[in-house]
């Protein structure tokens, strides 16, 4: 069985648009492209290395694929830690049309993306790693296809832009399985889905012994 894992950068207010550079995705008049750059250091870079350490294939929405395909095949530095990986692995691409995919080892998922992904997940092989692909992520989440999240949260509020979970996101609980923070203020949090949203009320909760003692001291 293959898992679908998501690794994404977000601002503190959940924006994930154009983290890598000013021209990455200026749609909607987004003015803050490259907002992750000032907060990267050796430690947070090592956290990214952990994400790309296990075997994986890439799972991408069309826009992110086009951005990647315009950049990574042209990185010729043999020591670049990401270019070799991204160029070598299989890229599975979700698209409503039938574009020609020029980047080596690229495959369209077909018209029924959800069915194609369910088939891929049932097979043996490397996990399917999602990068970027904000619109596509909503489809994955809505259909219960995401098995794990790694979210790198950056200490910045952007106020506008595409969000990891926008309006209409499917409500769901998440379980935090690991978290770390770094000197530049970046927090790396690892989550897995945890069923339906759980609710409750403090209105009728029995007070703890400490609370009962606090109340006694106030009377």
Image (cartoon, helix red, strand yellow):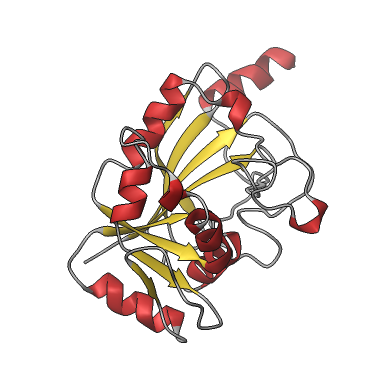
Residue 17 left/right relative to 1:
right
The C terminus, quarter of image: top right
Report the residue that reaches farthest toward the top.
Answer: 217
Relative vertical location of residue 208 with respect to residue 215 in this rendering, above or below? below
Give the total number of marks visible in the rendering: 0
The N terminus, quarter of image: bottom left
Q: Residue at x 58, y 64 (%)?
A: 63
Q: Position of residue 113 (x, y in %)?
A: 44, 80
Q: Residue at x 51, y 37 (%)?
A: 152
Residue 149, visible in the rendered structure: no
Q: Residue at x 34, y 53 (%)?
A: 87
Q: Residue at x 44, y 48 (%)?
A: 74
Report the residue that reaches farthest toward the bottom.
Answer: 111
Residue 79's image quarter?
top left
Q: Position of residue 170 (x, y in %)?
A: 58, 67
Report the residue that reaches farthest toward the right.
Answer: 29
Q: Position of residue 187 (x, y in %)?
A: 52, 30
Residue 41, visible in the rendered structure: yes
Residue 214 left/right relative to 131:
right
Relative vertical location of residue 183 with respect to residue 98 in this rendering, above or below? above
Residue 119's image quarter?
bottom left
Q: Position of residue 107 (x, y in %)?
A: 37, 73
Relative vertical location of residue 99 with respect to residue 126 in this rendering, above or below? below
């Amino acid at each position: 069985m293959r898992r679908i894992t998501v690794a994404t950068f977000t601002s503190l207010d959940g924006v994930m648009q154009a983290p890598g550079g000013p021209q990455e995705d200026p749609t909607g008049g987004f003015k803050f492209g490259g907002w992750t750059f000032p907060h990267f250091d050796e430690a947070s870079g090592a956290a990214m290395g952990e994400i790309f350490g296990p075997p994986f294939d890439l799972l991408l929405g069309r826009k992110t694929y086009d951005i990647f395909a315009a950049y990574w095949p042209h990185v010729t530095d043999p020591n670049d830690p990401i270019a070799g990986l991204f160029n070598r692995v299989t890229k599975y691409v979700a698209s409503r049309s039938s574009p020609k995919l020029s980047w080596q080892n690229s495959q369209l998922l077909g018209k029924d993306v959800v069915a194609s992904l369910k088939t891929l997940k049932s097979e043996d092989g490397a996990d399917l790693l999602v990068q970027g692909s904000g619109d596509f992520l909503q489809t994955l989440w809505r259909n219960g296809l995401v098995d794990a999240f790694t979210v790198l949260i950056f200490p910045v509020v952007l106020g506008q832009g595409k969000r990891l979970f926008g309006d209409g996101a499917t409500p769901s609980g998440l379980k935090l399985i690991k978290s770390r923070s770094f000197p530049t203020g970046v927090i790396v949090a690892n989550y897995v889905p945890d069923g339906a949203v759980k609710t409750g009320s403090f209105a009728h909760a029995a007070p703890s012994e400490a609370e009962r003692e606090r109340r006694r001291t106030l009377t």
